[in-house]
Image: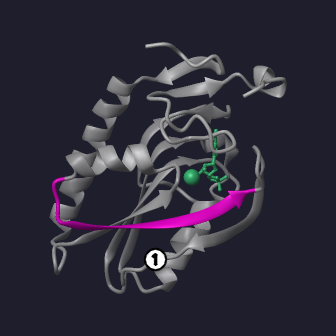
Amino acid sequence: METHPLVKKILFNQDQIDKRTNELAKEIESYYRDQKIKDNTVIIVGLLKGCVPFMANFIKYFNHECQTEYMVVSSYMGGTKTSGEPKINLDLNLSIKDKHVLIIEDIIDSGITLDYIKKYISFKGAKEVKIVTLLDKTEGRIAPIKSDWVGFEIKNEFVIGYGLDFDERLRNLPYVAVCDVEKLKTWKW
Ligand code: IMP
Ligand code: MG
């Protein structure tokens, strides 16, 4: 397989991500089994668009009754800086009142988006809100938020692939990689 020219370094390949996702799914599934949830159903809320590859893989391994739902929340002012004002562009359609909600995210950086969404879902009456993220950039944290389950911790670098984008591109790379931001400055698509 050819590596994309904007890749500086591949951090996690498909096999590594797959293995870790399976481990997470088993761990989380066992957590919910122990909770003995009333109607046995977990509501999985994926944050679009970045969650797509991770969530698609995760739910195949997650052997527990669930309903899936999606939200679109924007927090990036088109680029690599957080605006600090998350905005809900697609809201929940399922009722989450008294439900156990599991949010699926691609990456947590400042934590501002998730902090906002977690509060929002709690406000809507969820019984419990848990978070699983594929990647966690702990150094970038501004909001006081911690993911309940983390695939991989990474350094404060701009990463692409496996759902993560630059300007809506590169989400389709089958690995997580550090982006060559120098090359990006003069890059012609
Ligand atoms: P936060 O509110 O700063 O935690 O931003 C989280 C969102 O920013 C994620 O859901 C991603 O969409 C985006 N993001 C953060 N870091 C990166 C990155 O390194 N590459 C691509 N998108 C990122
Ligand atoms: Mg995202």
Q: Position of residue 139 (x, y in %)?
A: 66, 41
Considering every residue shown, the one lying at the far right of the view is: 186
**Quadrant into which the N terminus falls:** top left
Residue at the disc numbered 1: 92
Q: Quadrant of residue 111?
A: bottom right
The colour scheme is one colour
- The local secondary structure at tag 1 comes to loop
Q: Position of residue 138 (x, y in %)?
A: 60, 43
Circle 1 Cα neighbour tier, 10 Å, few/some/many (<14 / 14–19 / ≥20): some
Residue 71 within the magenta-colored segment of the rendering: yes
* Drawn side of residue 112 relative to residue 162, left or right: right
Q: Is residue 52 above or below residue 161?
A: below
- Check mark 1 vs ligand 2: CB closer than 8 Å? yes or no: no
Res 146 seen here: yes
Q: Position of residue 152 (x, y in %)?
A: 46, 35
Res 144 seen here: no
Considering every residue shown, the one lying at the far front of the view is: 189
Q: Is residue 18 above or below residue 108?
A: above
What's the residue type where badge 1 is placed?
A: Leu
Q: Position of residue 169 (x, y in %)?
A: 62, 38
Q: Nearer the viewer, residue 46 or 33?
A: 46
At x 18%, y 54%, the residue is 30
The tally of labels here is: 1
| Range of residues picked out in magenta | 63-76
